[in-house]
Image (cartoon, rainbow, N blue to C red):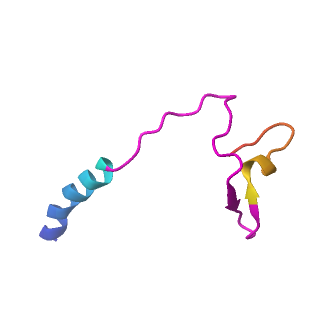
């Protein structure tokens, strides 16, 4: 148990040291990497651009 209490602070520092802080996209901005093919839950390959409907895309 003492070992866990000693390792926890190092694990937290390691976790936060390597996280990326990206700026949020403003509403109405273009989708980054819209043509990148991703696998959906059914196993089908689809891009965000292909999934977009006339009213937009909610992610």
Residue 30 drawn at (x, y percent) = 68, 34
Rendered view: 23 above or below 48 = above
- Which residue does the image show at 71% across and 49% down from the upper left? 35
User: Main SS of the magenta segment?
Assistant: loop
Q: Is residue 20 left or right of residue 48?
A: left
Q: Is residue 20 left or right of residue 59?
A: left
- Which residue does the image show at 14% across and 69% down from the upper left? 3
Q: Quadrant of residue 41?
A: bottom right
Q: Is residue 41 left or right of residue 19?
A: right
* Residue 36 sits inside the magenta stretch: yes
- Which residue does the image show at 20% across and 55% down from the upper left? 9
Residue 6 drawn at (x, y percent) = 14, 62
Residue 37 drawn at (x, y percent) = 70, 58
* Residue 34 sits inside the magenta stretch: yes
Residue 40 drawn at (x, y percent) = 71, 63
Q: Quadrant of residue 10?
A: bottom left
Q: Which residues are magenta?
A: 18-45
Front residue of this view, candidates 10 and 51:
51
Quadrant of the image containing the N terminus: bottom left
């Amino acid at each position: 148990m003492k070992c866990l209490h000693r390792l926890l602070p190092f694990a937290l520092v390691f976790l936060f040291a390597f996280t990326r802080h990206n700026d949020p996209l403003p509403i109405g901005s273009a989708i980054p990497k819209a043509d990148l093919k991703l696998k959906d839950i059914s196993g089908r390959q689809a891009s965000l651009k292909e999934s977009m409907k006339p009213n937009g895309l909610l992610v």
